[in-house]
Image: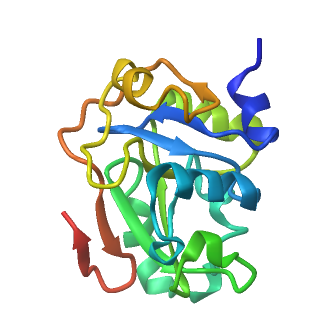
């Protein structure tokens, strides 16, 4: 039986629990896997995607850490884990299929145990976008994912969300401007 880690490493799409909803994700370095997620969701690449990680070091290959001023670093790091997605300057080598039309990237650190375990085992963050077709409400249980997206995902982690009542707030890490509440 294939594991979530093997699916991730082989370029598959994984459905997994986050803080409030289920996400669709894959290896952020596998362009064809990311493109598969965009096709499943009918989501334009220009919008960019979120990276979800178990710890900050997993995000370093994708973000421009040096562009986060020292006086802002504590507030950026203190917002995690869970619930807050922060838009930070992207590393110049971060592919456009992750950043979309922006020179920034949205990132979040979670304490959701299934995601933390996957990220620790792969040494990478996972792409994170809600498990739903564009325009439909996101799945909040693995049963909903199985019912609506079973034919589209390669692996389903049958865990539970952290029980938050709404998807993460998205803010600009440096200015605090809110993009989604």
Q: Quadrant of the N terminus?
A: top right
Q: In which quarter of the image is residue 7?
A: top right
Position of 115 relative to 180 (above/below): above
Residue drawn at the location 54% of the way across and 58% of the way down = 38
Query: Along the line of sight, which residue is nearer the eye, 126 or 75?
Result: 126
Query: Along the line of sight, which residue is nearer the eye, 94 or 43?
Result: 43
Residue 50: x and y in percent read 49, 61
Q: Quadrant of the C terminus?
A: bottom left
Residue drawn at the location 64% of the way across and 85% of the way down = 66
Query: Along the line of sight, which residue is nearer the eye, 54 or 102?
Result: 102
Residue 172: x and y in percent read 35, 78
Q: Please state the total of marks drawn on the protein image.
A: 0
Position of 79 relative to 177 (above/below): above
Left of 54 or right of it: where is 164? left
Query: Along the line of sight, which residue is nearer the eye, 77 or 28?
Result: 28
Coloration mode = rainbow
Residue drawn at the location 76% of the way across and 56% of the way down = 30
Left of 129 or right of it: where is 12? right
Residue 48: x and y in percent read 50, 71
Position of 20 relative to 150 (above/below): below
Residue drawn at the location 25% of the way across and 81% of the way down = 177
Residue 26: x and y in percent read 64, 46
């Amino acid at each position: 039986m294939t594991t979530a880690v093997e699916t991730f490493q082989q370029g598959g799409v994984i459905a997994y629990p986050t803080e409030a909803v289920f996400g669709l994700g894959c290896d952020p370095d596998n362009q064809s896997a990311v493109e598969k997620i965009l096709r499943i969701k009918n989501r334009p690449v220009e919008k960019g995607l979120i990276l979800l990680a178990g710890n900050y070091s997993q995000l370093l290959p994708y973000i421009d850490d040096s562009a986060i001023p020292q006086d802002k670093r504590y507030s950026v790091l203190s917002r995690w884990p869970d619930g807050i997605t922060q838009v930070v300057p992207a590393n110049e080598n971060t592919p456009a299929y992750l950043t979309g039309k922006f020179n920034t990237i949205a990132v979040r650190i979670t304490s959701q145990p299934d995601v933390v375990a996957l990220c620790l085992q792969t040494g990478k963050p996972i792409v994170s976008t809600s498990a739903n077709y564009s325009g439909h409400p996101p799945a909040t249980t693995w049963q909903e994912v199985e019912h609506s997206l079973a034919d589209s995902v390669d692996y389903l982690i049958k865990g539970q969300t952290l029980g938050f009542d709404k998807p993460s707030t998205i803010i600009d890490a440096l200015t605090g401007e809110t993009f989604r509440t």
